[in-house]
Image (cartoon, rainbow, N blue to C red):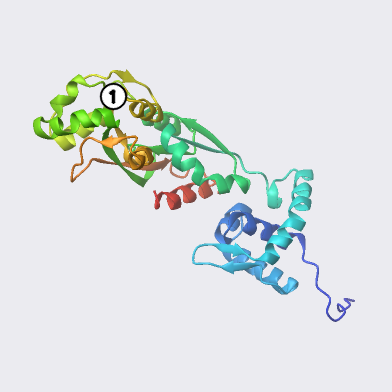
């Protein structure tokens, strides 16, 4: 026979409700927690409401996108996180009581990963998502994606064929730049006589075949590029550093050199009304993985890219 709780007593929540609470607290949304736990979103919502009834406190503020923990939730998470994680570890499971997901294998250009993608994923890492990151050129990375070596690839071109699916991630604008000393000498002659005046200036680029620079020449100047690189280094951050140091000129993604342009460390040699734009894509193998952390990383990248 079940005895009634004394007046004013608080029912002790079961472990499943606490695990669900911790997953919502760490992921920041009911939907993300449902993916982590392998539950439906309505089930997660019902469990959180049940926990709120039992504790007689509001735990999360519902926002247009996700939820924000209340002070009560912060206090509860501080009390239960370590014991629940210890219990999960003792039983061979990860945080929130679920089997620890495999790391997400993410690949893409070194510069975009370092300056944009990885910082955007930092909150997921603090919530238990593990990443294994590979940096490189798009074509080899897409081949490795087809072979199953990566879960997601940020590609600078749209993958061809039906073996991969891809969605647009962000647009990057290209800018023709040089240090102020070079710009003072070159801007007026470039405007008056055209790009031929740059042939005597060292060109700094990230690849011997000059893909970015050639595209800029075709799009802006309507002609082929007829000069060779003075320096070729496979990292646009190194190209940026050399151009800032006064080694010569280059064409760079504007996001990468925005701070230097704002500070005056770099100057635009040309300001076309229609600058060349390149679209990056987030690629994966169709149906290759339903792992919840892969989904979380994909959704976070797409969300973050709207502000890039």
Q: Quadrant of the N terminus?
A: bottom right
Label 1 sits on residue = 248
Quadrant in the rendering for residue 17: bottom right
* Residue 213 vertical placement versus 35 (above, below): above
Q: Regarding mark 1 in the picture, which secondary structure is present there?
A: loop
Could you tell me residue 255's position as x and y percent?
36, 41
Residue occupying the point 69% across, 46% down:
94
Could you tell me residue 90's position as x and y percent?
79, 44
Residue occupying the point 30% across, 30% down:
179
Residue occupying the point 69% across, 49% down:
95
Q: Left of 302 or right of it: where is 46?
A: right
Could you tell me residue 41's position as x and y percent?
57, 63
> Residue 18, can we see it?
no
- Badge 1: how crowded within 10 Å, few (<14), some, or many (20+)? many
Q: Is 19 in front, or is 257?
A: 257
Q: Can you name the residue that lies furthest to the bottom here?
A: 7
């Amino acid at each position: 026979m079940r005895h009634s709780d004394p007046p004013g007593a608080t029912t002790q929540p079961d472990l499943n409700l606490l695990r669900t609470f911790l997953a919502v607290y760490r992921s920041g949304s009911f939907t993300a927690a449902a993916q982590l736990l392998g539950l439906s979103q309505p089930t997660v919502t019902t469990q959180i409401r049940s926990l709120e009834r039992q504790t007689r406190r509001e735990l999360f503020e519902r926002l247009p996108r996700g939820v924000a923990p209340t002070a009560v939730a912060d206090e509860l998470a501080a009390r239960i996180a370590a014991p629940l994680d210890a219990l999960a570890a003792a039983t061979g499971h990860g945080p929130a009581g679920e089997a620890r997901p495999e790391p997400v294998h993410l690949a893409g250009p070194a510069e975009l990963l370092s300056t944009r993608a990885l910082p955007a994923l930092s909150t997921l890492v603090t919530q238990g998502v593990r990443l294994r990151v590979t940096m490189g050129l798009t074509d080899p990375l897409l081949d490795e994606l087809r072979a199953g070596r990566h879960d997601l690839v940020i590609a600078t071109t749209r993958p061809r064929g039906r073996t991969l699916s891809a969605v647009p991630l962000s647009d990057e604008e290209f800018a023709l730049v040089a240090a102020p000393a070079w710009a003072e000498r070159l801007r007026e002659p470039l405007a008056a006589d055209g790009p031929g005046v740059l042939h005597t200036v060292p060109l700094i680029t990230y690849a011997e075949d000059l893909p970015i620079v050639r595209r800029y020449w075709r799009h802006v100047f309507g002609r082929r590029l007829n000069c060779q690189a003075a320096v070729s280094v496979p990292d646009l951050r190194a190209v940026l550093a050399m151009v800032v140091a006064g080694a010569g000129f280059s064409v760079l993604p504007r996001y990468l050199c925005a701070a230097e342009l704002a500070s005056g460390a770099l100057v635009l040699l040309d300001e076309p009304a229609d600058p060349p734009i390149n679209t990056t894509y987030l690629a994966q193998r169709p149906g290759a993985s339903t792992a919840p952390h892969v989904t979380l990383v994909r959704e976070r990248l797409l969300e973050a890219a709207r502000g890039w």
